[in-house]
Image (cartoon, helix red, strand yellow):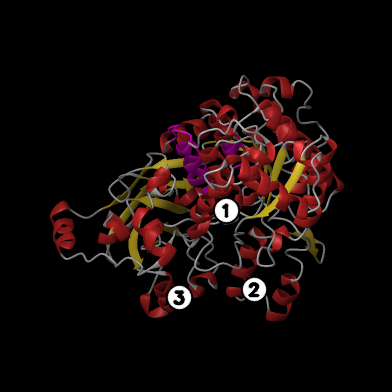
Amino acid sequence: MHTHDRAVGVDRKLTNYADRDFSKFIRRAFLASAGLDPEDLERPVVGIVNTSSDFTTCHREMPQLIESVKRGVLEAGGLPFVFPVMSIGEILTTPTSMLFRNLMAMELEEQLGSQPMDSVVLLGGCDKTVPAELMAASSADIPAISLVVGPMSVGSYKGERLGACTDCRRLWSEFRAGAIDETTIGEINQELAPTAGTCMVMGTASTMACVVEAMGMSLPFAGTAPAVSAHRLRLGVQTGRRAVEIATADRRPSQIMTAGAFRNAVTVLAAISGSTNAIIHLTAIARRLGIELDLDDFHEIAARTPLLVDCKPAGQNYLPDMHRDGGVPALLKTLSPLLDLDVLTITGQTLGEALDGAVAPQAWQSTVHALDDPLGPTGALVALTGSLAPDGAVIKVAAASARLLVHEGIAAVFDSLDDVEARLNDESLALTPDHVLVMRNIGPVGAGMPEAGSIPIPRYLARQGVRDMVRISDGRMSGTAYGTIVLHCAPEAAIGGPLALVRDGDRIRLDVPGRTVDLLVDDDELARRRADLQLPALPPRGWSRLHASTVLQAPEGADLSFLQ
């Protein structure tokens, strides 16, 4: 943790000239060049993180949101300072945005520790930006408040409501199976992402927005208000005002994101059937704060929390529907018997006090269900162990096929993304719906952990109507994806985990009710294979080298070892 600076405003974090008074003098000279006068410089400084980028299309309206935040800061007597941080766009980043989450967290932590600000507004939205910001704020531990850009509005095609990206995957699968022609898929393509904002299904961006609000790190409704709505702009102003208040109160992330707050976040994660990526992100943030959060915690909380929110991919609706129907406050109100209501929120109130005025789900709406009228059963997320994942793996049961939750099949092994690309659709492999597709070397060390765990159904099987198979990997899947998919297998193949020893034709048994995933090969044979095993070389240079040589495994949050 960084030590707290006793100075305030622009006198924080003085440049080192071996003369503190000269540092203040020259700093004021340059601030005067920016048009700031001595009265301005008496105000508390609020940093505003700018993750705008043409490569991050979800953040297209962020410049307007920044202006709203600045207005709120000025109204409350603060001095806003906007500064850039690397922007991680999910769709336009190779090989995967996850490779750069820790780099963004490290960069922002250094900026928070080296620039003068009394508090900071963490503006993000696209999948990895929000966890990176919270990881950085946790380590820097200066007063911070989160504000996401909000979800896209919902599109439509010939009367059917559509949205990124669950519908992207579903309709692309239909196209691959020959059920949709090229003209139709081209027309659909233009309707899937109709406005600025993040994916409006319960993918990682929506999931993180909801759990951050549940943790008390953003204002009520900040998780769900649409990107293009007036409500989003009003939240910007309110967040700016609150940023000045938390600066004055010295209300820091370590006071908000307590063990109880993380348990609340996991309860909401289960109730929304959120993205499995949130398991990795929440674990990483918690460990930055010295809080132990492991797979058993996620499993046990999910086991007592029913599915309450009807949003794709586990339901049918979209995040703007959840917002219209009461948002996260309505969900928290109905979940209150399962929550720690004594935790502090960014408003200075406890969660219980903040929910006093919240309205429980109403009879007229259908997106947020009551605790006694759930959409689905408990256990949306299940933590697995077994000989194939001795340190743990996860499966999102709410997005899986019930008939495959207990399944034994023959392994078809792919060593990389390129291998899948080259061979998956080769009919000579003679894959059947009962095969278990295994992809390895896509874990944190092996490939930066891409969202490739939802291996496509082989094209020739898709054309026969097959829509799901058991798939297993040491990588991740998008929160927008669906299927019977075992993820985050640890230890990963690239460091010699059991996935590295699987061969075509081996039998694998998945038993979700029993919480196991096992490779049915005897120990002597595995020992022979291990003796012949050659691990892949680390990347030769740069960030990829630093990441691969220091990144932790998925159950530990996939953070860098020296940052926890």
Q: Amino acid at mark 1?
A: Lys
Q: Dot 3 corresponds to which residue? A: 421
Q: Dot 2 corresponds to which residue? A: 179
Q: Earlier in the sequence, mark 1 or mark 3?
A: 1
Rendering coords of residue 122 (x, y %): 66, 45
Q: Is residue 45 above or below residue 251?
A: below
Rendering coords of residue 215 (x, y %): 61, 33
The residue under the point 72% across, 20% down is 353
Q: Is residue 25 above or below residue 174?
A: above
| 468 on left or right of 314 | left
Rendering coords of residue 354 (x, y %): 73, 24
Q: Earlier in the sequence, mark 3 or mark 2?
A: 2
| 562 on left or right of 537 | right
Taking depth in this image into account, of 43 and 203 the one nearest to the observer is: 43
Q: Nearer the viewer, mark 2 or mark 1?
A: 1
Local packing at callout 2 (Cα closer than 10 Å; few below 14, some 14-19, many 20+) is few
Mark 2 residue element: loop
Q: Amino acid at mark 3?
A: Glu
Q: CA distance from mark 1 to mark 3?
A: 25 Å
Taking depth in this image into account, of 543 and 368 the one nearest to the observer is: 543
Taking depth in this image into account, of 562 and 28 the one nearest to the observer is: 28
Q: Dot 1 corresponds to which residue? A: 128
Picture quarter containing residue 10?
A: top right
Asked if one can make out residue 114 in the rendered structure from this viewpoint, the answer is yes
Q: Which residues are magenta?
A: 267-293
Rendering coords of residue 239 (x, y %): 76, 39
Q: Determine whether label 2 and label 1 are within 8 Å by CB.
A: no
Taking depth in this image into account, of 132 and 402 the one nearest to the observer is: 132
Q: Main secondary structure of the magenta part?
A: helix
